[in-house]
Amino acid sequence: MRATVWFLGLMLLALAAIAAFSYPAWTLLHPRFDFPFHRIGERIGMLALLLGFVAVARHLGLADRASLGYGLARRAFVREMSLALALGVASMLAVVAVMSALGLLEWSGAAKVSGGALLALIAARALSALAVAFIEETFLRGAMHSATEREAGARVAVLVTATLYAATHFFASYHIAPGEVTPWSGLELLGGTLRAFAQPLAIADAFLALFAVGVVLGAVRAATGNIAACIGLHAGWVWVMLVTHELARPRAGAPLGFLLSRFDGFVGWLVLAWTAALAVPLWRFYASRASRTA
């Protein structure tokens, strides 16, 4: 599990960088630029993660296309990613349809959006979803899966990456007003970022749902040997979620409202059940597809 320790250490390094360097960076930048303190801290964490990722990838022998999950030929990669994107969108639209049928969503916001604005929203969220999918899948199902699989096998790689995938979704955005910034604000920002973990029962439904999603993506990665389908599925799911968040909100007082999490009003018990139902068919589909193209 040496590789897993390296990647967990990388996450801890990024969090430590937020605590240590947010205030010094803010004192340098704030007199010239009106950047919010939390935004500076987030960028420092991302930079530390990027630099650390490059170093760890080279140290563990992961700095090649195959280890990062991009071993498939470009045309085949785009084809598999596109197919998975369509599957991801279709399956998540089905979840949204079930939510609506159960009276869990209030769509009043959708009536205020014109046709042109709706198309712009859909396009913008598609780009956001693809960016998120490429970054997260390259890190988790790409490099981390490859490194862990080499040392401990595919099952451990799937479980470890799924756990980290679920946990990182609870890093919250925490704001500190300019007039309240002190030399200790980096630590305050770190504590605020991790505050969701102080009440584990409150996030249990969302965590389990995200863990299940991570397991499905990891199983697809193990079956195909690359992250093309993982990126497509991930992007398709996130795309539909982002658009839904803009157009609808959880219906207050819905009898089955507990099926949506209090964390984000979407990912909860219903998504967990839907993911569990899709897990085996998706794995079999991609295992069969991989065996035909091998």
Image: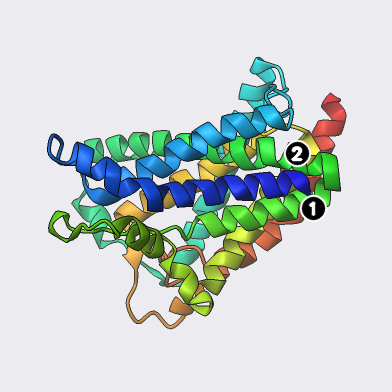
The residue pinned by badge 1 equals 156
Q: Secondary structure at mark 1?
A: helix
In the foreground, 166 or 280: 166
Q: Position of residue 126 (x, y in %)?
A: 42, 36
The quarter of the rendered structure image containing the C terminus is top right
Asked if residue 180 is positioned above or below residue 286 in the image, the reply reads below
Using residue 86 as the reference point, say whether residue 39 is left or right of it. left
Residue designated by label 2: 147
Q: Secondary structure at mark 2?
A: helix
Crowd band around label 1 with a 10 angstrom C-alpha radius: few (<14), some (14–19), many (20+): some
Going 66% across and 54% down the picture, which residue do you hit? 162
CB under 8 Å between callouts 2 and 1? no
Of mark 2 and mark 1, the one earlier in the sequence is 2
What residue appears at the point 20 percent right and 57 percent down from the top-left corner?
181
Asked whether residue 182 is in view, the answer is yes
- The residue under label 2 is which amino acid type? Ala
**Kind of residue at badge 1:** Val
Q: Residue at x 59, y 52 (%)?
A: 165
> What x and y, as percent, mark residue 46?
44, 40
Number of numbered labels in the structure image: 2
